Amino acid sequence: MDSKQSLTQLIEQWINPDIQAMNAYHVADASGMVKLDAMENPYQWEEPLKTEWLSTLKQAELNRYPEADASGLKNQLGQLMQVPEGMEILLGNGSDELILLLSLAVAAPGRTMLTLEPGFSMYRQIARTAQLDYSAVSLTENFELNVPATLEAIREQQPALIFIAQPNNPTGNLFDVDGLRQIIEAAPGLVIIDEAYTPFTDADFMPWLNEHRNLLIMRTLSKAGLAGLRLGLLVGSPAWLSQIDKIRLPYNIGVLTQATAEFALKHFDVLQHQTETIRTERARLYRELEKLEGLTLWSSEANFVLFRTEQGRARGLHQGLRDKGILIKCLDGAHPMLVDCLRVTVGTAEENNQFLKALSELL
Ligand SMILES: *Cc1c(COP(=O)(O)O)cnc(C)c1O
């Protein structure tokens, strides 16, 4: 090491310039706030269920490496999510890890990840991490698919990977099924339908796996009520998954995660009951927001609602809500099409009321 170099110079010399240019994923401080910014399920488990869970954790062998294949857990997930016969599951530490594994598996100079924007911000972040070129096709003004523009981008860029969130985040809508089919058929490489919001919609593209050999389905337990657990799954043919599995670190799903997920899936009716309540609350929240002056709303198949404020007011309202102890997500500045937009996660009835009251006072 050159002893005359400062620490800054050392870092500039050795950290990859693309990584130096990146910003870390920002998580807002939410201590003590009504937290409606991150699509979390607001409900806890009741005491007896927590006690039962803790007693199963007692049997976990922390001195041993976790079961590498997690076959018991995969069987449970396969049944619950009606994974088609012949398809398999690959588990990730959240679906974020699966996006990274997919990106690393296809990455090579000149390879492209294509997505739709406004969309999920982690796709771009992870493309950079994996040194993939990143390209995004704009949705229409109402956040629908622009099929001709997407097909054109596919023709031009021949993307290795296409990510489509269905329903989409942060817009909450489902895309047209015929348009999706055209995109999958035109794609030269892999298409991943990211069904993170499955608990809040009747849409289900799992059966499409049998029809399209370049399709994979990605899901997560995060939005159903286990965001803290970090468990995501990629579903598709064993031929694809066995390739991606080569770069998965061998024990990526820990003993406690496996035991907790198995327990939670045995009691999935509890989570289902909670997500059904959230769906009902989503409809009420939407109706109440509709009554407020000056907001443009988009209907949602997810556990959040996107809305646009009058021109130039989003940041002020976001801060005003914050001052009243309520944290939602400000999307103004995140993408040109999200100008003046805010996104609120559906909370408990009580939390939603607090949000609505505070917002109507500020308006
Ligand atoms: C929240 C979200 C994810 C990330 O889920 P994790 O499993 O918690 O990593 C993936 N895709 C979309 C579209 C999301 O909104």
Image: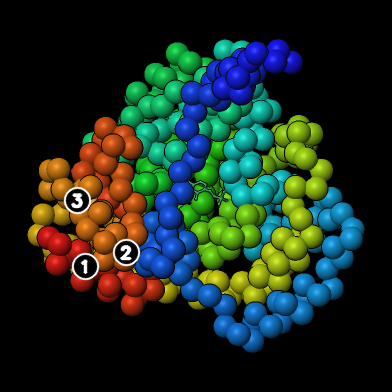
Using the image as rendered, state which of residue 322 and residue 142 is in the foreground.
322
Question: Badge 3 local density, few (<14 within 10 Å), some, or many (20+)?
Answer: few
Q: Is residue 223 above or below residue 278?
A: above
Residue type pointed to by label 1: Ala
Q: Earlier in the sequence, mark 3 or mark 2?
A: 3
Q: Secondary structure at mark 3?
A: helix
Residue type pointed to by label 3: Gly
Using the image as rendered, state which of residue 39 and residue 174 is in the foreground.
39
Q: Residue furthest bottom?
A: 48
Mark carried by residue 326:
2
Label 1 near ligand 1 (CB < 8 Å): no
Inter-mark Cα distance, 1 to 3? 13 Å
Q: In the rendered view, does 321 fall on the left or right side of 96? A: left
Point out residue 137 in the picture as x, y percentages from the top left corner.
38, 27
- Check whether the beta carbons of the residues at disc 2 and disc 1 lie within 8 A of each other: yes
Q: Which residue is mark 1?
A: 358
Colour scheme of the picture: rainbow
The residue positioned 64% from the left and 54% from the top of the image is 231
Residue 58 in sight in this render? yes
Inter-mark Cα distance, 2 to 1? 8 Å
The residue positioned 64% from the left and 87% from the top of the image is 48
Q: Is residue 203 above or below residue 190?
A: below
Point out residue 316 in the picture as x, y percentages from the top left corner.
19, 50
Point out residue 25 in the picture as x, y percentages from the top left corner.
49, 40
Residue type pointed to by label 2: Ile
Label 3 near ligand 1 (CB < 8 Å): no
